[in-house]
Amino acid sequence: MAGIDNIRSGHSLNTTNRTPARSNSDASSPTSSSTTRAAEQDSVSLSHQSKAIGELHNDMTTTPSFDSAKVAAIKEAIANGSYVVDSEKLADNMIRFEKELGGFS
């Protein structure tokens, strides 16, 4: 199996199971029966927050992240030469963005 350093350097992770297979005679032993029963009783439940996050994730993956009609209109305006950039508004937005990131004081 590949170590964590090999994974970071781009090598694939080998996940083969190295435990030997049990024979049918081992399956009837008391140890394997109790292990099987314990495994059958394990369960997982999700909190309301995790369910809400899952629903939010599903909504985000199905909803486009941009307005395709607006993008098409801007592309058309650029193509026909009618798109005008308001340099003052652009500069103000760039400064505001930098302030939000903490770049300027």
Image: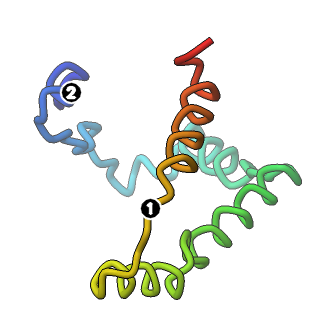
First in sequence: mark 1 vs mark 2? 2
- Percent coordinates x, y for residue 10 in the rendering: 12, 35
Q: Is residue 93 above or below residue 48?
A: above
* Amino acid tagged 1: Val
Which quadrant would the N terminus be assigned to in this image?
top left
Q: State if disc 2 and disc 1 touch (CB < 8 Å).
A: no
Please tell me which residue lies in front, 81 or 25. 81
Note whether 33 is above or below 84 in the view shown.
above
Q: Residue at x 27, y 84 (%)?
A: 79
Compute the Cα span from label 1 to label 2: 44 Å
Q: Does 88 sit left or right of 74 as displayed? A: right
Crowd tier of the residue under label 2, counting other residues whose Cα lies within 10 Å: few below 14, some 14–19, many 20 or above:
few
Q: Provide residue 104's location: percent of width, then percent of height.
A: 56, 16
Q: What colour scheme does the image use?
A: rainbow
Q: Nearer the viewer, mark 1 or mark 2?
A: 1
The residue that disc 1 covers is: 85
The residue positioned 69% from the left and 44% from the top of the image is 38
Q: Which residue is mark 2?
A: 8
Of residue 48 and residue 105, the one placed in the foreground of this image is 105
Asked if residue 19 lies left or right of residue 5, the reply is right
The amino acid type, in three-letter code, at marker 2 is: Arg
Residue 55's quadrant in the figure?
bottom right
Q: Quadrant of the rendered structure where residue 52 is?
A: bottom right
Q: Residue at x 11, y 35 (%)?
A: 11
Mark 1: few, some, or many residues within 10 Å (few <14, many ≥20)? Answer: few
Judging from the image, what secondary structure is the residue with disc 2 in? helix
Relative depth, front residue between 73 and 11: 73
